[in-house]
Image (cartoon, helix red, strand yellow):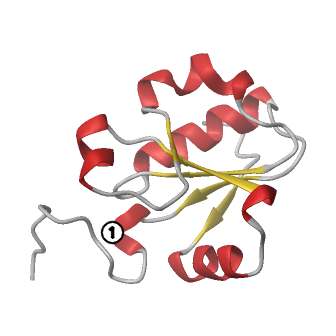
Amino acid sequence: MDNLEFETLTAEEFDAYLKHRQEKEYLLIDVRQASEYELGHIPGAKFIPLAEVETRLFSLPAERDLIFYCHNGGRSQWAASLAAEAEVCEKKVYHLMGGLLARGGKTLPGYPKVQ
């Protein structure tokens, strides 16, 4: 990941981003596994498992910001790096740091919390 031409959003920045933008301005992309996506996802997110991201990059809309997310941020960082390096987007490419785990304390059911 030498070419880091994408931006990182914290959970708070992500929520603010969504609040101040219309859905047609961006595309949320969930890069988790199908079983994870089926348990719960951010409404409106397009499901593209990480294993398929590279082959489907050029099917993504170039005129919208791309926001990748996963469970804890690792997979989405990789996906955002691939998209940025391939220059598939005329707008910005983002990844949600900390993934769903960091998003306002909202986690998916079935994942235990360690205290």
Which residue does the image show at 33% across and 82% down from the upper left?
Answer: 105
- Badge 1 marks a residue whose secondary structure is helix
Which residue does the image show at 84% across and 37% down from the upper left?
Answer: 62
User: Which residue type does callout 1 highlight?
Assistant: Leu
Task: Pinpoint residue 67: horizontal percent, then vertical percent.
Answer: 63, 53
User: Is residue 36 shown above or below 110?
Assistant: above
Q: Is 79 in front, or is 67?
A: 67
Q: How many marks?
A: 1
User: Is residue 90 shown above or below 87?
Assistant: below
Tell me: 15 left or right of 71.
right
Tell me: 22 left or right of 57.
right
Which residue does the image show at 43% across and 75% down from the upper left?
Answer: 103
Q: Is 17 in front, or is 10?
A: 17
Which residue does the image show at 74% across and 32% down from the upper left?
Answer: 85
Task: Pinpoint residue 84: horizontal percent, then vertical percent.
Answer: 74, 38
**Dot 1 alpha-carbon crowd within 10 angstroms: few under 14, some 14 to 19, many 20 or more:** some
Tell me: 70 left or right of 23.
left
Quadrant that contains the C terminus: bottom left
User: Is residue 14 shown above or below 6?
Assistant: below
Furthest-top residue in this view: 55
Residue 41 image-quadrant placement:
bottom left
Q: Which residue is label 1 attached to?
A: 101
Quadrant that contains the N terminus: top right
